[in-house]
Amino acid sequence: MLRRPPPLMPGAPIAVVAPASAPRTAATYEQGLAQLTETYEVRRAWRPGSERGYLSAPDADRVDALHRAIEDPDIRAIFCVRGGYGCLRLLHRIDWALARRHPTLLVGYSDVTALHLAFYTKARWTGLSGPVVTEWAEADSATLDSFQAWCRGTPSDLIGNFDAGLTPLASGTASGPLLGGNLSVLSRLIGTPFAPDFEGAILVLEEVAEAPYRVDRMLAHLEHAGVLDAVAGVILGTFTTGELDP
């Protein structure tokens, strides 16, 4: 059974954690915090100065901050500072019994895909693939309105030009749990105890700055692992191209 957290209403306390990389600039982080503070009571669980190379802090510190946010009875949601890399390193360190006792809304995308899928698999959480803190100051009104509607439990209509250049490969209707996120991160969970059962799910995929051949390789991996045969449907988000040839 899914463990849905209560609706996230304006003024609710939220924790800001950095389970992956640190912000590229202090300005985008502070601007994002200022934007969030207009709607929620923001409690920082990460501050600049603890970085370790491409990670925002040592593994033990990052997972400890996550645990403290989960077990705090006041916290209504956990917002991630940024993606980048690092969430995969934490999965075997997370106290899943604690997570099952305290379902909390987790917000983020990109590398946070690893946490979303692992919390779904191990603790039956429902998460929200939404802007990371460093992007909040630049989020448009449509994104913010849609995000807050989903947090309140009153989702709005989908927004976007879904007819532009899109050709369905198989027509029909499907329903199921929405699972997925960043293709690179998702593909690296296959074969681990943190990958969900994709049977009957709607698979959502996005990727950034990956060459077409690498996307092809990751999709082939999902096919060979049986994921593409198991799902009821596939939704593709934004894909941006990196280098073209292997």
Image (cartoon, rainbow, N blue to C red):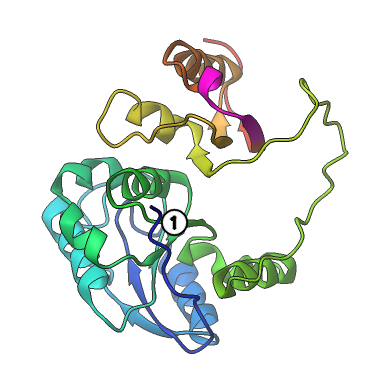
In this picture, residue 143 sits left or right of residue 210: right
- Point out residue 85 in the picture as x, y percentages from the top left corner: 34, 43
244 over 12 or under it: above or below: above
47 over 54 or under it: above or below: below
User: Dot 1, how many residues are within 10 Å of its Cα: few (below 14), some (14-19), or many (20+)?
Assistant: many
Displayed quadrant of residue 209 = top right
Q: Nearer the viewer, residue 111 or 145?
A: 145
Q: Residue furthest front?
A: 1
Task: Check disc 1 and report the residue beneath it.
Answer: 126
Residue at image position (37%, 56%) is 125
Queried whether the magenta region covers residue 216, the answer comes back as: no
> Is residue 86 among the parts visible in the rendering?
no
Q: Nearer the viewer, residue 4 or 12?
A: 4
In this picture, residue 118 sits left or right of residue 187: left
Q: Amino acid at mark 1?
A: Thr
Q: Nearer the viewer, residue 19 or 117?
A: 117
Residue at image position (41%, 15%) is 225
Residue at image position (50%, 73%) is 32
In this picture, residue 139 sits left or right of residue 129: right
Q: Nearer the viewer, residue 155 or 26?
A: 155
What's drawn in magenta, residue-wise?
Answer: 228-235
77 over 164 or under it: above or below: below
Queried whether the magenta region covers residue 231, the answer comes back as: yes
> Is residue 51 among the parts visible in the rendering?
yes
Residue at image position (64%, 40%) is 175
Instruction: Tally the marks.
Output: 1
Indicate the secondary structure of the residue bearing disc 1: loop
179 over 103 or under it: above or below: above
- Point out residue 105 in the picture as x, y percentages from the top left corner: 41, 66
- Point out residue 103 in the picture as x, y percentages from the top left corner: 33, 65
- Point out residue 130 in the picture as x, y percentages from the top left corner: 54, 58
